[in-house]
Image (cartoon, rainbow, N blue to C red):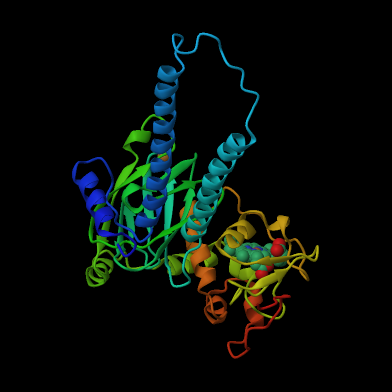
């Protein structure tokens, strides 16, 4: 990789060929490895220093040479040295680690999103186009990919060692991780959080394809309905559209374009609408009531699976107008919906 000098590349290749080290198959890998080898080097140097001093002192100050112990009352220079040098090393490690952390946890704006649901004992990946995979994930090479992940039961942890990524997958909350695969091929996926008797079987295969092959794969694996289309169906069948029709008289706020906006809540605080907020708004509506609305939305806790929630989130995320909502409307409110009426800005949405 760009960062690595020849000797480095040689060492990593050799370690990998000897099955001592995972391949460097993502953009972040060389950066993680650089810090790892730095820590390893500091540890080896520290250990060697202690071992050498131990040996030298026990020979030099052995009893025959030095029958009466000399009392040393302290040396400011010595103490300052062994304080300042380790402190400097720790601070370098801290700053280096923090910079790497930000790089790992902030996905680039152009990252494509794939959803992952973990459950005892398998991984399910859902592409926005509706392609589903179990214990497998196909991704394009050279393109940042963000995973929005959630667990359906207990804590799991999503880890691809060859990409140097690992992230907790938590029940009740979306967590994200991103990577950019740099080499086509197949890689191991592991669950790295003990999650029950068959934890060791919670493994899978990551397949990195060239962008063209990835496009072909998407076409071959399509299920006919995108996540957003599934979400649209759910939105109508669960009756969400009866309140979120976008009509002036609607009892719920207009959801078109709400994703990415800042909502003002009844308590005056502002919330950015992201995936996590949408999911939470469906499950715990009374937790954050949008200003100007009554807390009448029922909770859907226990009524929608994580897959269903992902579909709804993906649907609301991509909802640009209420035209189709009004088309599918099933309640008496539909009398008010004239298709020519432009969607009303019924909520207190402040666009950023
Ligand atoms: C009985 C009417 C009603 C139904 C049914 C309803 N909602 Fe709501 N919804 C509301 C109201 C009122 C608010 C605003 C107050 C609040 O935040 O609780 C709201 C807020 C929201 C929000 C937060 C965004 C915002 O602009 O405030 C989302 C997202 C949402 N609803 C999605 C849904 C989904 C998805 C369904 C169906 C599963 C649904 N709602 C069903 C009335 C309803
Ligand atoms: Cu697990």
Of all residues, the one furthest to the right in this rendering is 267
Q: Quadrant of ligand 2?
A: top left
Tell me the quadrant of the picture where the C terminus can be found. bottom right
User: In terms of image quadrants, where is residue 321?
Assistant: bottom right
Left or right of residue 305, residue 199 in this image? left
Q: Position of residue 84 (x, y in %)?
A: 58, 43
Q: Can residue 299 be seen in this snapshot?
A: yes
Relative vertical location of residue 288 with respect to residue 33 in this rendering, above or below:
below
Relative vertical location of residue 49 with respect to residue 137 in this rendering, above or below:
above
Q: Nearer the viewer, residue 63 or 277?
A: 63
Identify the residue at horizontal 43%, vertical 43% (top origin): 39
Q: Position of residue 327 (x, y in %)?
A: 53, 79
Q: Position of residue 125 (x, y in %)?
A: 37, 55
Identify the residue at horizontal 61%, vertical 22% (top origin): 72
Of all residues, the one furthest to the left in this rendering is 17
User: In terms of image quadrants, where is residue 211?
Assistant: bottom left
Q: Position of residue 306 (x, y in %)?
A: 49, 52
User: In terms of image quadrants, where is residue 240?
Assistant: bottom right
Tell me the quadrant of the picture where the N terminus can be found. bottom left
Numbered-mark total: 0
Q: Nearer the viewer, residue 286 or 66?
A: 66
Q: Can residue 171 be seen in this snapshot?
A: no
């Amino acid at each position: 990789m760009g960062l690595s000098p020849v000797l480095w590349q040689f060492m990593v290749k050799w370690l990998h060929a000897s099955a001592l080290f995972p391949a460097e198959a993502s953009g972040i890998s060389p950066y993680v490895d650089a810090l790892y080898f730095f820590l390893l080097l500091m540890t080896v140097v520290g250990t060697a220093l202690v071992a050498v001093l131990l040996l030298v002192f026990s020979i030099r100050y052995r009893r025959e040479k030095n029958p009466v112990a000399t009392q040393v009352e302290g040396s400011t220079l010595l103490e300052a040295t062994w304080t300042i040098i380790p402190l400097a090393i720790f601070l370098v490690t801290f700053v280096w680690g923090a910079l790497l952390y930000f790089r790992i946890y902030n996905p680039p704006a152009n990252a494509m999103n794939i959803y992952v649901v973990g459950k005892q004992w398998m991984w399910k990946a859902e592409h926005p186009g509706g392609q589903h995979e179990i214990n497998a994930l196909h991704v394009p090479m050279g393109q940042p990919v963000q995973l929005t992940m959630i667990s359906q039961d207990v804590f799991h942890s999503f880890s691809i060692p060859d990409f140097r990524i690992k992230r907790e997958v938590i029940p009740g909350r979306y967590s994200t991780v991103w990577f950019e695969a740099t080499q086509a091929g197949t890689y191991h996926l592991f669950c790295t959080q003990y999650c029950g008797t068959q934890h060791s079987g919670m493994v899978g295969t990551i397949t990195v394809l060239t962008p063209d092959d990835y496009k072909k794969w998407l076409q071959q694996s399509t299920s006919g309905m995108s996540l957003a289309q599934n979400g649209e169906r759910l939105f109508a069948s669960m009756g969400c559209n009866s309140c979120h029709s976008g009509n002036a008289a609607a009892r719920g706020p207009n959801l078109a374009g709400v994703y990415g906006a800042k909502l003002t809540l009844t308590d005056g605080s502002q919330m950015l609408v992201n995936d996590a907020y949408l999911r939470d708004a469906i499950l715990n509506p009374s937790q954050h009531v949008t200003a100007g609305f009554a807390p009448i939305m029922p909770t859907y806790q226990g009524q929608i699976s994580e897959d269903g929630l992902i579909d709804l989130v993906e649907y609301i995320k991509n909802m640009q107008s209420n035209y189709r909502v009004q088309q599918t409307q099933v309640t008496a409110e539909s009398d008010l919906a004239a298709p020519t009426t432009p969607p009303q800005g019924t909520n207190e949405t402040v666009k950023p």
